[in-house]
Image (cartoon, helix red, strand yellow):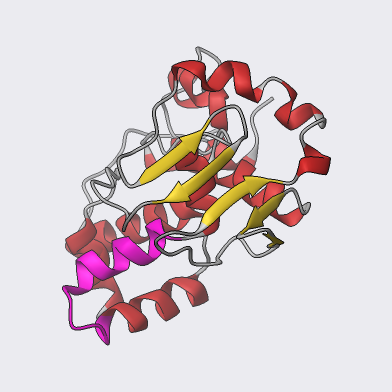
């Protein structure tokens, strides 16, 4: 049965990989039913410039699991930086703890990462963190709590990680289920036209 996340992907007509490993299988809703959701689903229409901007903003928020308020706060912080606003915005999104867990392979998706954090399974520098939006920094150590390793979510993880390689900005100890932040996020490949997103936030 399809959930609301998959319907949002169908509405946008793009894979955002919101449902962990399901998105990599033939069960993916966008593979089975590529048309827009709804009884009266029609062919996708050409969007205006404003419509394209809003669409990219929706995709970014869905990809990272953030709401409008959090996005505006991140954008304001990016604007105040001496670096490029676009690069800073991507850096802030990439440094979120739920994203780091996903990129380390400790979670199948960012939403799964948020769930693990909320349930208290994740530690940063040996302290339990329950905020998915916690910003990690260089040399931070992210680990699964020792008490949580026997949980179903982690039991088979060491085996599945054998063939996984995290991005260059992360180090992963596959046996300990522990990672380290080596630098700033880089080469974030997103299904989002980031310049259109910035234009929508500048209004």
Task: Specify whether 155 is left or right of 179.
Answer: right
Residue 38, can we see it?
Answer: no
Residue pictured at 21% horizontal, 67% vertical:
86
Residue 143 x %, y %: 62, 46
Residue 49, can we see it?
Answer: yes
Q: Is residue 96 above or below residue 36?
A: below
Question: Between residues 182 and 195, which one lies in front from this camera angle?
Answer: 182
Task: Specify whether 153 is left or right of 48.
Answer: right
Residue 154 x %, y %: 71, 30
| Image quadrant assignment for residue 176 | top right
Residue pictured at 16% horizontal, 73% vertical:
84
Which region is colored magenta? 79-95
Location of the N terminus (image quadrant): top right
| Image quadrant assignment for residue 51 | bottom left
Residue pictured at 30% horizontal, 75% vertical:
201
- Magenta-highlighted stretch: main secondary structure? helix
Task: Specify whether 162 is left or right of 56.
Answer: right
């Amino acid at each position: 049965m399809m959930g609301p996340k998959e319907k949002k992907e169908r509405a946008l007509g793009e894979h955002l990989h919101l449902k962990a490993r399901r998105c990599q299988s033939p069960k993916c809703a966008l593979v089975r039913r590529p048309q827009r959701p709804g009884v009266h689903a029609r062919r996708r229409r050409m969007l205006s410039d404003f419509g394209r901007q809003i669409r990219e903003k929706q995709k970014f928020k869905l990809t990272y699991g953030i709401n409008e308020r959090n996005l505006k706060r991140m954008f304001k912080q990016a604007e105040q930086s001496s670096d490029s606003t676009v690069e800073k915005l991507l850096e802030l999104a990439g440094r979120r703890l739920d994203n780091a867990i996903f990129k380390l392979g400790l979670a199948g998706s960012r939403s799964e990462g948020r769930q693990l954090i909320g349930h208290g399974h994740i530690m940063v520098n040996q302290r339990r963190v329950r905020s998915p939006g916690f910003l990690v920094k260089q040399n931070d150590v992210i680990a699964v709590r020792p008490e949580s390793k026997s949980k179903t979510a982690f039991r088979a993880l060491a085996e599945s990680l054998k063939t996984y390689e995290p991005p260059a900005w992360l180090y992963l100890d596959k046996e300990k289920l522990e990672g380290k932040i080596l630098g700033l996020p880089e080469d974030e490949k997103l299904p989002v036209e980031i310049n259109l997103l910035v234009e929508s936030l500048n209004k």
